[in-house]
Image (cartoon, helix red, strand yellow):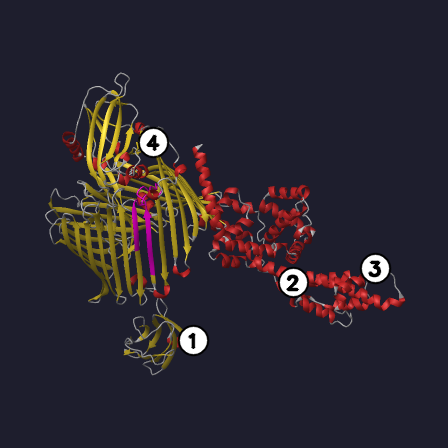
Amino acid sequence: MLKFYQGVIFLMLFCTVQVRAQVSFVFIPELHGRTLDGLLQVKLANTGSQSQLVSLTVKVSAADAGNIVSIKTPAFQLMPGTNSLPGGLIARSAIRFAENKVATICRQSGYFMEGDYEYCFELNAGDQSHQGETLGDQCFDYYLQPFSPLLLLNPAEEDKICNKRPPFFWQPLLPAVPGVQYRLVLTEVKPGQAKVEALNYNMPLINQLGINSPMLFYPSLAKDLMQGKTYVWQVSAYKNDMLLVNSEIWEFTVFCEEETAAVVPESFRDITDLTKGNFYVARGKVLFAVENVYDKAPLNYKIRCITRPELEMRKLPAIKLNRGNNHVVIPLAENRSFVDGYYYLLELKLPDGEEKQLRFLYKSETE
Amino acid sequence: MAKVIAAWYTCVLLSVTVHAQTVKVNAPVKQLEEYAKKAGLPMGNPMLQMILADSLNKRSAMAQAKAYLRQNLPAVPDVGAGKYLQESARQEFFQFIGNSAGKQQLTQLQQGMSTIKDTARIRQYIADKLRGFYALRDETGVNKLLNAGAYSNSLKEASAGAFAENTPGMPMLGASVTIGDQLMIKNIPVNVRYSNISGQSTWNNPFADQSLVKFSFDKDAYVKRLNSIVEKKYDLKKYFLKDIDIKSAVKSFTNSRLEALQQKLTELGEKQSAAFGQLLNSDHIIQLDSLQLRNELLNNRALGITAEDLEPVVAALQDSILLAHPVADSSLNGLLEHFRTASAARKYMAGVFALKKEVGEGLQAKSIISDERVAGGKINGQLEEESNKIRNIKELLPLSGLQRLLLSAKQLDIGNIAASGSKGGVQDLFMSGIQTSFLNNNKFLMLGAGKRIDGGTIKDLAFNSSLDPGAYSMQFLQMGAGDITQPHSHAGVVNANTKSDSRRQYTTLNLPRNTFVGAFSEDISLGSYGRIAAQLSKSNNQFKNSAVGNDPMLASKAAALSLFNDFWETLSVGLDYNGQVSEWNMNQRAYVSYSGLGYNNPASPGAGRGTIRYGLKLKRNWYKNKLVLGVRSDFQDISSSALTSSKWKNRQFAIDGRWKLNKKIAFDARFNQSAMKSTGEKAASFQYMTRQLSLASQVQGKMAALPYNSNIMLGYQQIDILPQHSTLLNININHNLVISSHVLSLNLFYNKDIKGEAVYANLLTVETGWTYQVWKKISCSSGMTYLDNKAVVQQLGFRQTAGTSVLPRLNVNMYVDCRKNLLNTPQNYLFGNFRSELAISYQLN
């Protein structure tokens, strides 16, 4: 706030041109000169000690296009000190646009395009006795280049990331205006919520102002983001207490593939029962239970492909049987010899010499 | 007057468009309707009516003693199925109409019978109601069922949280309360979401709070509730006549009709009567075609009918002879007997053919009723189960106008809501107001009105004003054929007026203006290859008390009146293709859009101006998702001048890949480049450029028999923000080791600014954590933290979390991070040294 007033004083001291009478104009073209509405954010500094009835005329012209627009307010009371234009006054102002392309764009969008502009303010007496008398006029020149949009970069829109403390990157607001800073808001999106609703309804997890560079490493004090949750983020560029540009609202989901989450308990049926059924669907692995009354021993087994007998089974994992009841898992998902939809025959020779055969259909696990 | 003309203009524009589109999109629906017309009303078929009436008569006969039969009820008219009902069944049927549709309809029906005598409508009405009566399961008055639980309230979710922290540029204190509730008002479920956020900031010292509330009609819960009543009261299997043993019912119907035909043949001798009795049975009628039936007659020796006897000329001659000889004539006895038999055979066959037609139509009608869902699904392609439920509810439950209307509603939101329609119209708009949409017979209508104020929310307490007007009152409409989420053809309008308003410290002072936007959107399905959406949108802006050029009159026109002014400057068009090629495991998106420099759509805050934008996204996976590659590009040319070719040119390009070696090891690589260049009269110059390469690995394994998972990220980034050129190198290691039921975690992040241009100074953070349980109920984590931002701040601290379930659904979580500043400088604008959080949540679902 202090910086703002310093700026105001600076402008009052050095930017005033052709000042007459006791009224000067406080106007920051690089901010207020960008929009039609911004023109009426001019502040009138009345150094006189009495209030009087006045009306304000604002004229904007561009070097390469001529007159663009003029706005005339109805009469209003100018008080001693710094005056802002009253809201009701703005609503009753008369606007006259010129007939050229720059004026057309301004009339349609409310924004001034690139150009070398002159903003002239003229304050006239509004009372009957001094009707039309100029109390002060002042012009400001500024080469205006419209702001570029504020574009987000990373995390990308609708991306899935595994980093629970991600850094945020966006493009800077251009052209660079001294004193522009960024504000980043990050909030969780609850199921069923629209992005813009989440941004307003939910408590922000990050609402960081005062960012000078177009990037922010995840704040050190903040809690980690959570697996499986979706978040939205938006960046705003501002100067002092004026919001300049908002970015789009992007969302991303924190998702790390964790094996532990995918484990689904499955049953182990006795191998004798399985072989009796003579049909088994192996989803990525073969599971069975077997009783071993002997000492620890490796499981003697081999697998043949029935659908394509010439297919060689390579790198079958070694399985060890303990004494007692064993839950055997033969993982097949990583083995390229197993093809989704093919039939296979598992031949086992148990430690007691008994031989078993199990025909199974291989189905790959859903990724 | 201006508003009236604007409204008329809009309506004409819309009706022309919608009509044109409706004809195209509704073609399949029309086919269904025409088919139904050809087939006749399903329940208008006498065979079905009789079958149903027989069943109802039997049911009624078994329950003759019911008390309500004593009531003096009006008689069911002898039309349609009514004529087959016996008295007791008729009385019950009337009672059912009174109970289910209300006494008022009963009275209307009585009036219809006695005064208007509109038998066609009454026949249709009775046919519709008869199926409901046939399917009646629970005789409890439907109102009683509807009233049970019609008003109720259930709390779905409640949570509260609070935090305190001292990071510069962040709020100091904050608290939030969220309540999710469901109100049932006259069987209409309304979800209520209330949120209150309060807090205090360094930039806004007074304690401030903000309450937002949203009421949204819960369509799913509504259909579910009404459907449960339908299923309680009616056996839907019977309603769709699935239960009828059509084979035996048709046989019995056909036999009785054949008997009736035979009884009409009175003038025949015994021998001929017996022959007709044995000539045809129900199987003949069902199985044989008309030629075969005719042959059956001709081949019957007892009757002795020849093909000539059935010729119209011969038939006329025979009939005239029979008329000339009404009494027996001995000389002509044999001949007259043959003529009588032939005449009877002709009448008999005419009746048989009519019966054959009735049976055929009856079977067809039954299949229409039974398979309506299936047939509808085939024709419409997109008909979901819910639409069948809605149809049953509409047909079987007595609903008020509002309840009936809400069955066609897709959405009804009131309060602080997010409104969205198709691109070019309303999009990502947050407003205070109402938005509702309806879908009926594939026709879509969305309406909304509200007030948009962008600033003044609690998160924006730091801002007092905005460059963008951002405060409007607006009304919008979108309508057309097809659901908005499905392929559709819609037209929409937005009318907005700026507001000079203030909320808290935030003030918007705008020159008053009226903006009107007309938009069309067409979403076309490309089958399995995806969809393509096209949008065209045109805006027009009119300032109040404004004039152009030397026009002496200041006017305040409605923007809709001159919508086509400044056409190219205020036009926005776009094409967006989204699709996939499943054979290649690939999905893709391509888009291109243009918007004029003067384009202005207050209902779509993110809409660009003066921009040509195009881009492409491709993502493909191989080996069952083991290898995934994605490419993304986005190009924007943003005009900045109305007179010259000055532009901001933005080019973004990104490529990312993921290789999942096995279940335990995966690698990621990403590269993206983004550049903003200004072009124009001066030489083009880069204003901003960044290139970022990051490599990451995720590993799960065992370390000394202890399971662990480890994520490592390496990043290299070049950032040029003129005049600064910076290169950042960063590493992020996250390692978790599982020890028994505990987890030891280490998180290290280091960023080095190689060129020392201070875009972001060197930063090191190290965090450790140890998770454990206290009293088997409280899950805790404790850890140390260290932070060093070179020459700016250096901190050493402690972090503690604790969480527990006080009750099965009530969770409490606490978080504290406090640090000691070993070094602190005035340049520290991002790092505080204390944050604490407390969160309490009660979740019903």
Q: In the rendered structure, the residue with mark 2 lies on which chain?
A: B
From mark 4 to mark 3, how far is it between C-alphas? 95 Å
Tag 4 residue: B546
**Residue at mark 3: chain:** B
Q: Amino acid at mark 1?
A: Gly
- Amino acid type at image mark 3: Leu
Answer whether residue B606 is magenta in the image: yes
- Closer to us: mark 4 or mark 3? 4
Which numbered circle lies on residue A277? 1
Q: Nearer the viewer, mark 1 or mark 3?
A: 3
Q: Is residue B427 magenta?
A: no
At label 1, counting other C-alpha atoms closer than 10 Å, the crowd grade (few under 14, some 14-19, many 20 or more) is few
Tag 1 and tag 3 share a subunit? no
Alpha carbons under labels 3 and 2: distance apart: 38 Å
Q: Nearer the viewer, mark 1 or mark 2?
A: 2
Q: Is residue B668 visible?
A: yes
Quadrant assignment, res B751: bottom left
| Dot 4 and dot 2 within a common chain | yes
Q: Nearer the viewer, residue B358 or A65?
A: A65
Q: Are marks 3 and 2 on the same chain?
A: yes
Q: Mark 4 belongs to which amino acid?
A: Ser
> Which is more foreground, mark 3 or mark 2?
3
Query: Furthest-top residue in view?
Result: A129
Q: Position of residue A78 (x, y in %)?
A: 25, 23
Measure how far apart labels 1 and 2 are at the Cα level. 46 Å
Is B838 in front, or is B263? B263
**What percent of the width, then of the height, locates residue B661?**
26, 67
